[in-house]
Image (spheres, rainbow, N blue to C red):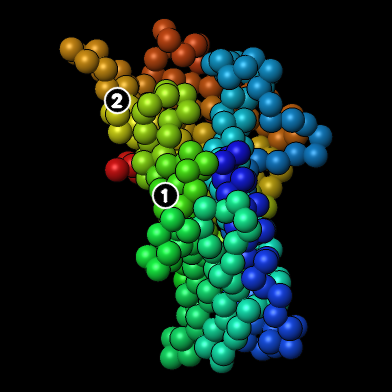
Amino acid sequence: MKSQLALALSMLAAVSLACGGSSNVSGDPATRSRNALPSQDSVAIGSPKSTSGSLKNPNGGAQDSTVGDASVWAATTATLAFDVNGSVIWALSLVKAISDLPPTSCTDTGCVWGPGSSALDTANYKLTVNFDASTGVYTWALSGESKANPGSGFTAVLSGTAQPSAIPHRGTGHFTIDNDAARALNPNNTDIGRLEIDYDNTTAGAGSIDVSFLGVKDNDHPGQTLNILYAYEEQQGGGDLDVATHNTTSGDRLAIHSRWLATGSGRADVKVSIAGGAGSAYTATGSECWAAATFKVTYFATDDNAHLGADSGVETNCSFAAAAFSNTQAP
């Protein structure tokens, strides 16, 4: 995230230098372009929330699923949502900051901000938004061209399509965050892989977001990479988050399906598969439920009590009565 933030600040400074156009070019085409773009607020994965308690696990992430203790999987659900939201926020807040400036030029079918750069930038950057009147679809891209190879063409770092609704920043769409392209333009960026995001936020309170992280770093295992799939559905204050991970180096897999109500109470059903070697493969499942507010465990059960702890509580105390394990597998 540090390298992403540095890249974002660099891009914003670069394009800002080239966006000194008169405000009289920011009429209807610019307004329509701005309103079509997704916003960080409307494209974000939710998580169990409470105003009276923290999701921080006091036991440092160790397995602790005894009734009355802090819920590990409520905290994990919030962490997984934060991981996605952090990437989405830096991308879409950057796009907003640039598009809020007067565009360099506009036509009836789109606008351009930039290109431009600051003295220390390794690339020139520009934001383009184009509109296809026949389909109602906007195509947008934040692109860079290396200063070391002028004339080589602009490469998209952030790009997407949007079909807006009547409400600004809401509709359906897709966008890509290409860390590999960003790193090629700016060696200070150390992030790798691609993020692909599909969203439908047309109806407030009932949106959906699908995210794939492909070839990203496994921060818990240096030198290894992960593929991760997220599927999130907002449900009038509650939510449903299905996450599947695949360490493409070790072959290990984890699948978490978390559901929660507007009160914050919820349930997570988890499957883990460790590839191992020489017959040492390991699989296990577990379910944990938690209460609202301070997110204390109300129920825990697993098929591996020897390693994951004793069952605790009764399932009737769960906000969701039955287990619903994920059927998703990350590539």
The percent coordinates of residue 102 (x first, y second) are: 70, 77
- The circle drawn on residue 276 is none
Q: How many marks?
A: 2
Residue sitting nearer the eye, 231 or 71? 231
Q: Specify whether residue 314 is in view.
A: no
Q: Does residue 232 appear left or right of residue 166 in this picture?
A: left
Q: Which residue is mark 2?
A: 250
Residue sitting nearer the eye, 247 or 177? 177
Residue sitting nearer the eye, 218 or 246? 218
Q: Does residue 249 appear left or right of residue 271 in this picture?
A: left
Is 23 rendered above or below residue 243?
below
Quadrant of the image for the N terminus? top right
Quadrant of the image for the C terminus? top left
State the separation of the CA atoms marked 2 and 1: 27 Å
Q: Which residue is mark 1?
A: 184
Hey, what amino acid is under mark 1? Ala
The percent coordinates of residue 136 (x first, y second) are: 49, 85
Residue at screen point 61% across, 32% down: 74
Residue at screen point 46% across, 62% down: 145
Hey, what amino acid is under mark 2? Ser
Q: Specify whether residue 290 is in view.
A: yes
Residue at screen point 37% across, 33% down: 225
Disc 1 is placed on an element classified as helix
The percent coordinates of residue 57 (x first, y second) are: 66, 22
Q: Earlier in the sequence, mark 2 or mark 1?
A: 1
Residue 149 figure quarter: bottom left
Is 236 rendered above or below residue 4?
below
